[in-house]
Image (spheres, helix red, strand yellow):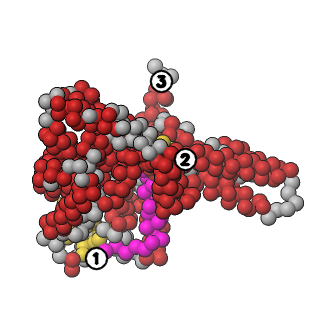
Amino acid sequence: MLRLFPLLLFFVMSFNASAAVSETQQSALPVLVEQLPTTKLNKMAPLIEQIAATSTPQVRAILQPLMDGDLYYLKSSKRVVSVYKNEQKQYQLTDVLTAEALPAVKKSAIKKVRTNNRLRGQIRDLLANLDLTSADTEIRIAALKQLLDNPNQTGLTAVNKLIKSEKDDDARELMSVILLIEQLEAGSTAEKLSAAKQLSNRLEPTVKNALVKQLDSLASNAQADPETKELKSVLSNAIDSIEQQASVFSLAENLFFGLSLGSVLLLAAIGLAITFGVMGVINMAHGEMMMLGAYTTYVIQQTFPNLIEYSLLMAVPAAFLVSGFVGVLIERGVIRFLKGRPLETLLATFGISLILQQLVRSVFSPLNRQVEAPQWMSGSLEINPILSLTYNRLYIILFALMVFFSLLMILKNSSLGLHVRAVSQNRDMARALSVKSSWVDAITFGLGSGIAGVAGVALSQLTNVGPNLGQAYIIDSFLVVVFGGVGNLWGTLVAAMTMGTFNKILEPSMGPVLANIIVLVSLVLFIQKRPKGLFPQKGRSAE
């Protein structure tokens, strides 16, 4: 028992000492904050350092408003407060030390604590250093990324202390990279060799910049010792390795963008493939069906501003019904009287497209409208530091495939699909078997227009909604249908993904205009060899 007494006494003394240090820091902070209103700008940096060094919970509540320009003090009492303007255009105050809400005042009663760009940069680094000890892993990783881009000695010292106790693998890897870059810049030749070898598989842009900078500094040294020559070789190999990996991931990113563009083309063309394949109608108003779907999304968000997270889920069936209903009206009112006259049908639908565009301009104005993205479609999935997949494009790819397979199931396993396939293969025989081809045409045209409306919902997440939205995709939609084979859904899928991917792979090296020209010329040459497309339609009507 006597042996345990000294140990117990040591713990009690340590606890009291730490408590005393904490109390000292707590008592020092108010004194430092009181100096903010009277300290000159050229002497503000050491004061900010002292405030951050207290490491108290109130430090962020002081430094963040100071960096954002929202830290003021009351002229009457010199009390330091954070400020925001309320709806009555008065200034709402919060005490930075006690977090006590104070009565709102006019601007004449307060004065801003002065700062400048240099101090804001210093504060940003100090806040990042504070975040290094946060319990939230994401906050720590964000702070480490900021430190990686803008290193400072305080942060490097903190990382050196924290790396052994860090439990998260990603955070520990970032800490290791930060220390290796510091070793590469300030270490001995042997340490630089070791750091360069370990950094050869890292893809952060800061790593490559540090390696290139180090290699450039050695390039002027013509008469180098063997270790320096070896360092040059290791640096060159590391840079080459990083560039090779970057080129692979760049190709993967272009493929992803190609699949995203292909999904948009698929949604735009799949409805056209049905109407063109069944009815032989060249519908120049198909792009305006997409436009109506996009505007339906906009109207739903304006009608239900508090349901933005669910607006797209509401917009999909609504856009399908609106565009589908307009499509049925067009077929019943115009197209059924022009059967067998493709030129007149083309001109009529072109005129309808102009009418719909002008109608939208009259109702919503010619200006583009912004459709908000729900929170679950914002952001990106980060694969590595140079490759990230945006959620909106990822969801559009999945949505396009879902629409495609749903339509395929309808056409394969329903009576409507049976009638549609019968009419598309042999209209006269279908009519002889009591299939009402005129109503099949109307429903098919409405179905194709409804799917175009659904495509407009997807497009509203990629571009602004305007009267000319559909014009950008109508030509590409026809190209997809002809390339894949008229009336063949699988052909439409393959053609859309091929065109989108081919286009995006060519764009980085040739530019978007030349890439489009090459794709168009390639399609013309292909159609000359295979006029019926990749998957030609079967049946007597196709002969």
Q: Which residue is mark 1?
A: 111
Residue shown at 70%/57% (left/top)?
Answer: 214
Q: Residues within 10 Å of mark 3 (few under 14, many from 20)?
A: few
Res. 408 image quadrant: top left
Q: Which residue is mark 2?
A: 251
Left or right placement of residue 66 versus residue 224 in this view: left
Q: Which residue is mark 3?
A: 4
Left or right placement of residue 182 versus residue 215 in this view: left
Q: How many marks?
A: 3
| Residue 352 part of the magenta segment | no
Residue shown at 47%/23% (left/top)?
Answer: 4
- Mark toward the start of the polypeptide (3 vs 2): 3
Q: Position of residue 286 (x, y in %)?
A: 26, 53
| Distance between the alpha carbons at the discs numbered 3 and 2 | 66 Å
- Mark toward the start of the polypeptide (1 vs 2): 1
Q: Position of residue 338 (x, y in %)?
A: 19, 53
Of tags 3 and 2, which is closer to the observer?
2
| Residue type pointed to by label 3 | Leu
Is the C-beta separation of discs 3 and 2 under 8 Å?
no
Q: Residues within 10 Å of mark 1 (few under 14, many from 20)?
A: some
Q: Quadrant of the C terminus?
A: top left
